[in-house]
C-alpha cells in the first residue's frame, strides 16, 4: 500500500505576496549596490586604491545578480500546474546556480588582473583617507541590506533570496579588507592595496562556488545528510505499529524536502490500520523537520531486503477463490477471504457462517490438497453459527 501526503499548497493569494516581498527587497538592494559601486569606483580612481575599485566592481556584479533574482522569482513562485505538480522551485535553484557562476567569473577575472599587478610591483601611489570613508560607508550599508534581505528570504522560504543576502555580505567583507589594507598602505606598505584586491577576488570566487555547487547537488537530487536521514528513520521506528524502516529516500526542491519511505508493519493488520500508522509517521517527521513538503510512504508486510521479494506473478484473488472452491465446495455468499502475500507464498484466512446442521469443513484435508499449488502457503478457517449471532 502506497500513499502520498503533501502539505496543503499555499493559496494563490500568498504567492504574489511572496513575489512582491522578494522584488521589493531586491530592488532596494539593487539601488544601494548601484550607488555604492559608483562611489567606490570613483573614490578608488581619484584616491589611488585598486582594492576599492575592485570592491566597486563587486558591487556592480551585485546589481547584475539582482536582475537575475528579479527574473527568477517571477517564475519560481508560480502555483503548481499540470506540467509542474510539485511547483516551480527548481527554477529558483537554477537561478542560484547562475548567480554563483556570475560571481565565479567576476572573481576570477579580478583575481587574475590584480595578481599580475602584484607581480609587476604592486601599487605606486598611496591611498588617501577618503578611501577609508567610502569603505566604512559600504560596510555599514551592506551589513544592513544583508540582514534585511536574509530576514525576507527566511520568511518566504527562498534559498535564492538568502543566497543574494550572502552575496551582499561578501561586499561588506571585501570592504572590511579594503579598510585594513588602506590603513596598512597609508603606513607605508603600499603593496597591501593590491594584495587586498586579490583577497577580495578570492572571497568572491569562494562564495560563487558554494552557491553553484549547492545548486548542482540539488538539481541531481542529492539527499539529506546522514544525520537527518537517521533521525527520520528513528522517528519512524519509534512509531507504534512500525516494525522497521527498510528504505528512506530524500531529495530537495528549493527549500523544501521530498521523502519516499517504506514502513514494515505486521501482516495481520488491516489496510486502514496500516494507513493510519503511516499518517502518524508523517506527522512525527514533519514535527522534526518543518520544511518537508511531500512524503510518499509505502506500507510493507515484510522486509524486502531480508527476504526474497514477493513475486507479482502470484495469483490474484479471483483465481485463488476459484481454486479454493474446488476443495471446499460452494462458499457461502457471506464468506470472506483474507489473503496474505508473504515470502512468495499466499496465506489464506477464510471466514464462514455455517449452520449447526451442516458439517464443518476439514481445514487439514483442504490444506493438504491445496499444497499441490506452488504458491500455496497456509489456510486458516474461521467459522461462526448464524443462530448464535442472531440470539446475541
Image (cartoon, helix red, strand yellow):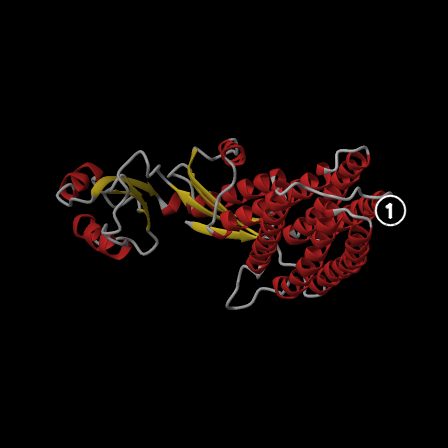
Compared with 177, 2 (above or below) is below
Q: Nearer the viewer, residue 4 or 46?
A: 46
Compared with 97, 84 (above or below) is below
Q: Nearer the viewer, residue 348 or 127?
A: 127
Which residue is drawn at the image coordinates 76% and 41% (left, top)?
Answer: 178
Q: Give coordinates of residue 274: x percent, y percent.
A: 46, 43
Which residue is drawn at the image coordinates 38% and 38% (left, top)?
Answer: 268
Count the labels in the image: 1
Secondary element type, mark 1: helix
Q: Give coordinates of residue 95: x percent, y percent.
A: 59, 58
Which residue is drawn at the image coordinates 15% and 45% (left, top)?
Answer: 373
Using the rendered view, name the quadrant where residue 136 is placed: top right
Q: Residues within 10 Å of mark 1 (few under 14, many from 20)?
A: some
Compared with 24, 227 (above or below) is above
- Classify residue 71 as left or right of residue 345: right
Q: Give coordinates of residue 320: x percent, y percent.
A: 23, 52
- Classify residue 37 as left or right of residue 322: right
**Residue 185 in sight here:** yes
Q: Nearer the viewer, residue 287 or 54?
A: 54
Q: Which residue is labeled 1 in the image?
A: 130
Q: Give coordinates of residue 223: x percent, y percent.
A: 49, 43
Amino acid at each position: 500500500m502506497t500513499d502520498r501526503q503533501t502539505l496543503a499548497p499555499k493559496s494563490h493569494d500568498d504567492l504574489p505576496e511572496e513575489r512582491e516581498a522578494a522584488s521589493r527587497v531586491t530592488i532596494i538592494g539593487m539601488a544601494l549596490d548601484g550607488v555604492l559601486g559608483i562611489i567606490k569606483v570613483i573614490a578608488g580612481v581619484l584616491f589611488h586604491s585598486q582594492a576599492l575599485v575592485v570592491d566597486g566592481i563587486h558591487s556592480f556584479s551585485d546589481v547584475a545578480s539582482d536582475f537575475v533574482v528579479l527574473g527568477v522569482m517571477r517564475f519560481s513562485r508560480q502555483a503548481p500546474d499540470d506540467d509542474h505538480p510539485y511547483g516551480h522551485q527548481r527554477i529558483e535553484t537554477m537561478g542560484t546556480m547562475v548567480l554563483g557562476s556570475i560571481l565565479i567569473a567576476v572573481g576570477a577575472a579580478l583575481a587574475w588582473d590584480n595578481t599580475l599587478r602584484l607581480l609587476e610591483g604592486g601599487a605606486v601611489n598611496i591611498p588617501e583617507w577618503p578611501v577609508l570613508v567610502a569603505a566604512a560607508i559600504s560596510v555599514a550599508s551592506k551589513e544592513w541590506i544583508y540582514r534585511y534581505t536574509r530576514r525576507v528570504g527566511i520568511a518566504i522560504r527562498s534559498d535564492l533570496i538568502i543566497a543574494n543576502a550572502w552575496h551582499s555580505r561578501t561586499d561588506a567583507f571585501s570592504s572590511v579588507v579594503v579598510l585594513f589594507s588602506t590603513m596598512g598602505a597609508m603606513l607605508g606598505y603600499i603593496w597591501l592595496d593590491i594584495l587586498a584586491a586579490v583577497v577580495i577576488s578570492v572571497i568572491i570566487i569562494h562564495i560563487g562556488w558554494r552557491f553553484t555547487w549547492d545548486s548542482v547537488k540539488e538539481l541531481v537530487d542529492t539527499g539529506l545528510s546522514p544525520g537527518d536521514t537517521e533521525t527520520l528513520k528513528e522517528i519512524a521506528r519509534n512509531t507504534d505499529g512500525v516494525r522497521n524502516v527498510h528504505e528512506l529516500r530524500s531529495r530537495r526542491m528549493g527549500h523544501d524536502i521530498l521523502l519516499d519511505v517504506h514502513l514494515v508493519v505486521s501482516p495481520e493488520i488491516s489496510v486502514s490500520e496500516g494507513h493510519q500508522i503511516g499518517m502518524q509517521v508523517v506527522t512525527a517527521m514533519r514535527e522534526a523537520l518543518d520544511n518537508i513538503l511531500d512524503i510518499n510512504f509505502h506500507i510493507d508486510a515484510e522486509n524486502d531486503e531480508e527476504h526474497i521479494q514477493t513475486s507479482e506473478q502470484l495469483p490474484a484473488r479471483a483465481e485463488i477463490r476459484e481454486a479454493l472452491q474446488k476443495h471446499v465446495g460452494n462458499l457461502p455468499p457471506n464468506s470472506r477471504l483474507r489473503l496474505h502475500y508473504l515470502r512468495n507464498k499466499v496465506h489464506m484466512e477464510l471466514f464462514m457462517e455455517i449452520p449447526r446442521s451442516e458439517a464443518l469443513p476439514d481445514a487439514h484435508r483442504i490444506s493438504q490438497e491445496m499444497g499441490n499449488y506452488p504458491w500455496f502457503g497456509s489456510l486458516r478457517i474461521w467459522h461462526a453459527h448464524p443462530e448464535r449471532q442472531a440470539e446475541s
